[in-house]
Image: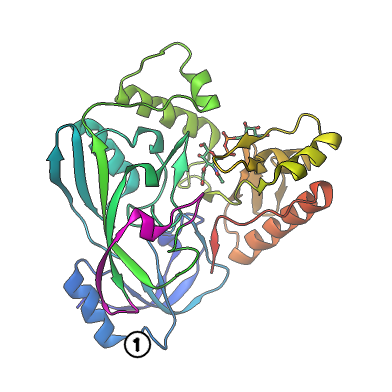
Amino acid sequence: MPAIRKNFSLKDHNSFGIDARTALYAAPENIEQLSDLFDHYDFKTQPYLVIGEGSNILFKDDFEGLVVNPGMRGVDLIEKKGEELLVRVGAAENWDQWVAHATQQGWFGLENLSLIPGSVGSAPVQNIGAYGVEFKDHFGWLEAWDLEQQKQVRLTGAQCRFGYRTSIFKAEYPGRYIITHVAFRLNKKPHLKLDYGPLKEALFSSRSPSPMELRKVIISIRQQKLPDPRDFGNAGSFFKNPLVARTIYESLKINFPEIPHFQDANGHFKIPAAWLIEKAGWKGKRIGNVGTWPKQPLVIVNYGGASGKEVVDFSERIRNVVEEKFGLLLEREVNVI
Ligand code: EPU
């Protein structure tokens, strides 16, 4: 049975650094401890919330329920078939430490996802992605506790229904599963993805980097553009990049001929939210303790001591100005509790 802490501060458990409290908190380290928790807390009728390192969450208020932070650790190479590898990792492992370890071991595929904050168990929830690679590209399967069926399940990629920053864990069934382990499909031979615009520019002097060099370049791009949550609380991109139909893109182009866009696999046009926010005049804008990051306005930062409500109010003002200017409604990427 894991210790259940009472009136627990979540300040060190959310990358925005919001000083919210939860009535109860538990960090089960294995399946036995997790299932013991079900005897002591009624998940059917009482509020609960599953968090990892809290890097995609904004606490607007205190939480009147149980916060569960799965503490399963470990990295196990479980299958080798020619050049293909399957590695099972505990949900509580830190994402970037896992990527560093995989790259050092010569288990390739995750280099572009270097330095993304958070834990391994949270990565599938929003199908993290960066520089042309998404979590789902190297996904094998995952193990989770299914609170509906009250048993452990193994889910495939098709069952997880990964999309742009989404999955069943975020869309169809939030709260139903507690992810405990993730299995990754990696390769002993590097197949580097180097086509993402800003990455190409950064690599101009080294056209055929090693996976470790690529990891270093990704880290340096991120460090130049994105604030470190240890310095300024933030949860990465606050909004998703809106996906619009061609007709909408074309009508926007009449008034804003320079509007950037990327076409996705389904023929939708992805418009960078950072550009919309910048053109609406909100790049580097600060109100009190909250602001948009001067180098990447899609990131909202807590300059110190902000409440969750201040951050939410600030983000609503951004949504309003972007909607007024472009007629596009920004959808939050960050989970507001
Ligand atoms: N842009 C501006 N002004 C800026 C910055 C960017 O106009 O100040 C425009 C430019 O047109 C640029 C475009 O936005 O080409 C894209 O910018 P960037 O490459 O920085 O990426 P992004 O679309 O803003 C997404 C992810 C990031 C991920 C990067 C790199 C989302 C919501 N965000 O940001 O993910 O690191 O691509 O792949 O898709 C996160 O999810 O928390 C996150 C940081």
**As displayed, is residue 25 above or below residue 287?**
below
Ligand 1 neighbours mark 1 (CB distance < 8 Å): no
Say left or right for 54 vs 249.
left
Residue stretch rendered in magenta on the structure? 147-166
Residue at x-position 63% and y-position 66%:
309
Residue at x-position 20% and y-position 44%:
86
Name the kind of residue labelled 1 in the image: Asp
Residue at x-position 50% and y-position 64%:
171
List the single residue furthest toward the right: 255
Q: Residues within 10 Å of mark 1 (few under 14, many from 20)?
A: few
> Between residues 163 and 211, which one lies in front from this camera angle?
163
Residue 307 magenta-highlighted = no
Q: Position of residue 85 (x, y in %)?
A: 19, 39
Name the image quarter holding residue 83: top left
Find ligand 1 in the image and state its quadrant.
Answer: top right
Q: Position of residue 48 (x, y in %)?
A: 41, 77
Q: Which residue is mark 1?
A: 42
